[in-house]
Amino acid sequence: MVRWICGFWAVVALVAARPARAVDVTTDPYPGVRHVVRSAGTPAVRAHVVIIDLTSAEIGLHATTPDRRGQRPSAWAAAVGAQVAIGGDLFDPTGYRPAGLAMGDGTLWPGSADDDRAAMLMWDQQTRRARVVPAGEVVAAPPAGVTQVVSGRPMVLEAGSVPATFVCSDADAIPCVRAPRAAVGLDSAGTRLVLAVVDGWSATSAGMTAAEVGALLAGFGADDGFLLDGGGSAALFVQGEGGLVSRPSDGVERAVANHLGVVYGAQPPGALVGFIREGDIFDATRGISPATVRLDDGQTTMTLATPADQRGRYSFTGLRPRLWCVSVTAAGYHPASKCKQVVSNTTEFNSIALVRDTVPIDAAVPDAARPDAALRDGGGGVKDGGGSGDGGGAGGDGGGMMVGEGGGCGCRAGAPSGAGAGTGAGALLACCLGLWGMLRARRRGRVQP
């Protein structure tokens, strides 16, 4: 009987502890822009995540100028020519004044100012790099080169970690309850932007806590991130997918103070060429052929074998102006990779030196880092399970499901599913098996002479 009870509860625990699977629908409305719609969880949650490759010269960021305040995201996007748009900072509806520092197209909003609670996203048009200024680092004025600034609070992700606690008494951000959300995240290189809009307060989507939003951003490759104005203001516009793609809790878009938009404009392609050589890229006598050269989008080519002075040469043409990464493999050599920014109407050189595989090298150190892996691997950097904090990832159950104590066997199996799903069930199963083994041993002891 004990054996049957333990087996029954072990199976129940294993099934119950299994985390809810996220269902992702992924589209690429524009080159360098990926849109993931994630649905999962109990209660149900639907999140829109847009991943933007900021290394692309075809992509730019825009924020609202003071004269365009108080518009719905779709109306503002149409007015400025943005293909993607979300709402910006918390704001005072009297005059649509953002709570934090705001700048659009190089124009600072009069009266806007930073404080120690707000974080902000800055976009430098000259360097084509973005930066998240964390809460507590008060900025009097944006530095030279910065043209776009959008603020918000609280931080939900800092240096890759979700904060352990939030100010639950913040009546504007309401970080500790599930609600419709808008958020922005950025990787450590400042080249991958992650926008998130979570539907909420409806039968089809409960919303997320601030911690859950932080885990969501981290799962898509962000290292730092913060909330934008949520609630009824949370809305996502994607022109190439019909316009408003999220479901605002009011049923319609809300006019907000400022916005953040992504502008895509196609540019003429460029080219990438180089030599694959042994040890020294400048030694023309060391060209390697055959060698397989692969771009991060899957295109491949083989190096030339002849003529002698062109041995080891490769080339790719018709490339979008963005950062491209080249990986090389050849028999008898360690693989290698290297990245290069391609510019419109320009041929860029990206030669790579290979090392014989008989020579030990530190394979753990890559030749160059790839800032847009989420766009390269086809999965948007999507993680199946939960992230850090109490959110448990997109569509999680918030606090983490506890299997409970006892389980019919007197064993404690209380591991949260978001932080190692199945741990509690495994403990319960092991406990039951151990108890069953002890009972068998005792029974054998009774029948022995």
Image (cartoon, grey):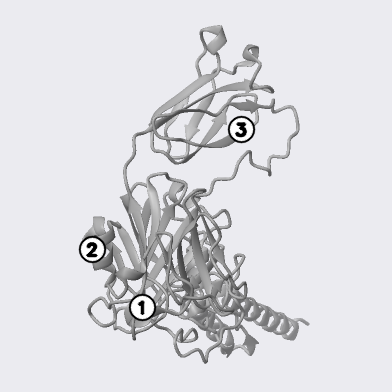
Question: Residue 400 at x, y = what percent?
Answer: 52, 81
Q: Secondary structure at mark 1?
A: loop
Q: Secondary structure at mark 2?
A: strand
Q: Residues within 10 Å of mark 3 (few under 14, many from 20)?
A: many
Q: Earlier in the sequence, mark 1 or mark 3?
A: 1
- Answer with the quarter of the image where residue 116 lies: bottom right
- 329 horizontally vs 107: left or right: right
Question: Residue 43 at x, y = what percent?
Answer: 38, 81
Identify residue type, mark 1. Answer: Ala
Q: Earlier in the sequence, mark 2 or mark 3?
A: 2
Identify residue type, mark 2. Answer: Gly
Disc number placed over residue 339 in the picture, else none:
none
Q: Secondary structure at mark 3?
A: loop
Disc number placed over residue 44 in the picture, else none:
1
Which residue is disc 3 drawn over? 335
Disc number placed over residue 243 in the picture, else none:
2
Question: Residue 261 at x, y = what percent?
Answer: 36, 61
